[in-house]
Image: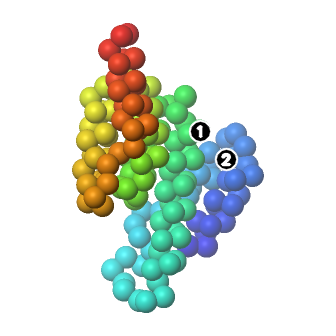
Amino acid sequence: MWTLRDLMRAATIATGPRRRELLTAACDIYTAPLADGQDYEWLQPHRETVRRWGTEAQLLLADDLLDSNPQTASDLLDKAIGLDRYNEALYAKAMHARHALGDADGIRTLLRALTKALADLDAEPQDDTITLATQLRTSLDEK
């Protein structure tokens, strides 16, 4: 837990290759919920904090890699969505990565997955997200 925290703190002030190195290390560390399988009362807030750090590491590294390596960025965002399946911003960022890969079906699949996840909460994707998906798919169709 503390190693992940320290990596994220260092990554926020680092730049270039050092930042990517720190974020990659953070992504490699967070592979499962903190104390997975344990159910102590005091654990839940710490588990949530660590989950957020893990998700943030995936998102920040994906942002850094989107232009140079969209496939890796897409893979990282898929992992982040697995950590936080109700986070609409992650789906939107993943749609941008799929667009960079020329994957119109991937954009459609992400919108469907988001719609299904939010239905669990009796919610729907925001209009902006639906519009984004449509615009990204349309721009690929025009190429």
Query: Dot 2: within a 10 Å radius of its alpha carbon, few (fewer than 14), some, or many (20 or more) residues?
Result: many
Q: Which mark is residue 19?
A: 2
User: Measured along the vertical axis of the image, is residue 19 above or below residue 1?
Assistant: above
Residue 50 seen from this side: yes
Q: Which amino acid does label 2 sit on?
A: Arg
Circles 1 and 2: CB distance less than 8 Å? yes
What element does badge 2 sit on? helix
Observer-side mark, 1 or 2, equals 1
Q: Which mark is residue 64?
A: 1
Q: As rendered, which of 113 and 50 lies closer to the eye?
A: 113
Identify the image's colour scheme: rainbow, by chain, secondary structure or one colour. Answer: rainbow
Query: Dot 1: within a 10 Å radius of its alpha carbon, few (fewer than 14), some, or many (20 or more) residues?
Result: some
Please give left or right for residue 45 compared with residue 116 in the image: right
Residue 33's image quarter?
bottom left
Q: Distance between the residues labelled 1 and 2?
A: 9 Å
Task: Name the residue located 47 percent from the left edge and 74 percent from the top edge.
Answer: 47
The image shows residue 7 at horizontal and vertical percentages of: 64, 61
Q: Earlier in the sequence, mark 1 or mark 2?
A: 2
Quadrant in which the C terminus is drawn: top left
The image shows residue 63 at horizontal and vertical percentages of: 56, 40
Task: Name the residue located 55 percent from the left edge and 36 percent from the top edge.
Answer: 65
Task: Name the residue located 51 percent from the left edge and 63 percent from the top edge.
Answer: 52
What element does badge 1 sit on? helix
The image shows residue 91 at horizontal and vertical percentages of: 40, 43
* In the image, farthest residue toward the top: 143
User: Measured along the vertical axis of the image, is residue 50 above or below residue 66?
Assistant: below
